Amino acid sequence: PLGVAQVPGGQGVFPSLTVAENLRTAGWMLRGDAANRASRVEEALALFPVLADRLDDPAADLSGGQQQMLALAMAFLNRPRLLMIDELSLGLAPVVVEQMLDVVRQLRDRGTTIIVVEQSVNVALTLADTAYFMEKGEIRFHGPTAELLDRPDVLRSVFLAGAGQRLEAQPSSPAVPVGPSSTSAEPGEAERKIALHVDGVSVSFGGIRAVNEVSFDVAPREVLGLIGPNGAGKTTLFDLVSGFLGVDTGRVVLDGLDVSDMAPHRRAAHGLGRSFQDSRLFPSLTVEETLTVALERWLDVKDPLNAALRMPAYVDSEHAARHRVDELVDLLGLGDFRSKFIGELSTGSRRVVDLGCVLAHGPSVVLLDEPSSGIAQREAEALAPLLLRIRDVLGAALVVIEHDMSLITSVSDRLVALDQGEVLTVGPPAEVLEHPDVVLSYLGGDSAVIGRSAPSQPERA
């Protein structure tokens, strides 16, 4: 009633309701004027045409980016006087962020006051006149947004830059257990061996082909980037590879072993690691406990009876795990958060813990779903060398879904562009990003949005 609306970061929809039901719920203040509500729903859907095609689908079935679009559409429905948006670009493809910026500018020009929480300074520069920078609950900077770029004391990497430096300083003694698959390969062996082979995988939901005959190979120590619009099937493809969804057709081969019919935990035991868009960790565990759970693959003694009786072998195994956790905490600069519950951490802090779990698991193939999502721009800039160092320490193949083009092009040996569940093109990053279909369906033309973590200074529109 007061004209205030908020878009929560990443969790702004009711997952069990359909898209249409979410929009109807958001328009509850217009329940006495059905015609006006229907008109505003049509306006909201015109902003996000992809939602118009999925009105009867549960919000839980939407991609992360599509859920963000729905949350924004729900907020726009009531034409608020004050609109607060938490993480405008979170999980969105560059062309969608460009569209969203245009919509937000239109609202601003109509007189709506807008407060945006945004990790990318480049994106903020295109939108906001004034910036407040907060750290540990205090305002560290207040002034013109452009002046933030001249404040390295404020814009700095708290976690990841130090982690990358510490990994670099320990090239011969990784702080994680390393399995047989991550030993150094003989010259040319990486080219002959395939760490992950995905052969013609497909899956459908209710007659809609979400992934259609997708194939690719990844060699040990190779980084393969997956890009594409929201709803292109990238995360669904990860679900197929990791076993959370069964394939309708096709095969998934991990280090020469067909794992197509294996459950996720069995694939993990064979060396497949995965992170999720939302850092899917146990909220009631502490950081220390979470990292210990991630070491399960390498524990020598797992029998609960040994644990209950505190047998010497179990005690030794527990001490070894605690020592490895100490190393990971020091490595990632998580000392201040060690005893905090995961549910108490910010999105960026959870992302750092998520990377620690990947290191602890020590996989031969790592699937990373938007690793820069929710972390500050300087952290994203420091993420690229850290990912490459993780690849080298583990000797692993990395498959990375990412919307930050500066990050994904700096780490990837090859890119695979997906759209509507199919492969558009595959090749070196520069070639893929110049493909006309990729530019049209995914990239758009806003350089600040395309390079969210690029150390540049875009002009404000």
Image (spheres, grey):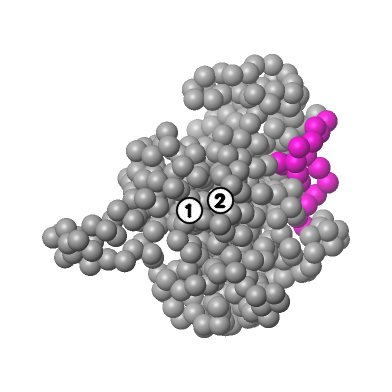
What range of the chain is rendered magenta? Answer: 441-459
Q: Is residue 80 left or right of residue 130?
A: left
The image quadrant of residue 320 is: bottom left
> Mark 2, residues whose alpha carbon is within 10 Å: few (<14), some, or many (≥20)?
few
Residue at 65% from the left image edge and 75% from the top image edge: 186
The residue positioned farthest toward the top in the image shown: 143
Q: Which is more toward the observer, 5 or 373?
A: 373
Which residue of the protein is positioned furthest toward the front in this rendering?
172
Res 170 label? 2
Specify whether residue 242 is painted magenta.
no
Q: Nearer the viewer, residue 269 or 163?
A: 163
**In the rendered structure, which disc, 1 or 2, sits on the residue that comes first in sequence?**
2
Residue 441, how many percent across, how many down? 77, 57
Residue under circle 1? 175
Residue 240 position (above or below residue 387): below
Labels in figure, total: 2
Does 185 sit left or right of 274 as displayed?
right
Quadrant of the snapshot with the C terminus: top right
Q: Identify the element where label 1 is drawn.
A: loop
User: Magenta segment, principal secondary structure?
Assistant: loop
| Residue 143 visible within the image | yes
Q: For mark 2, give the secondary structure.
A: loop
Q: Residue at x 84, y 62 (%)?
A: 431
Q: Residue at x 66, y 49 (%)?
A: 385
As for residue 442 lying within the magenta part, the answer is yes
**Residue plotted at (46% across, 39% down):** 334
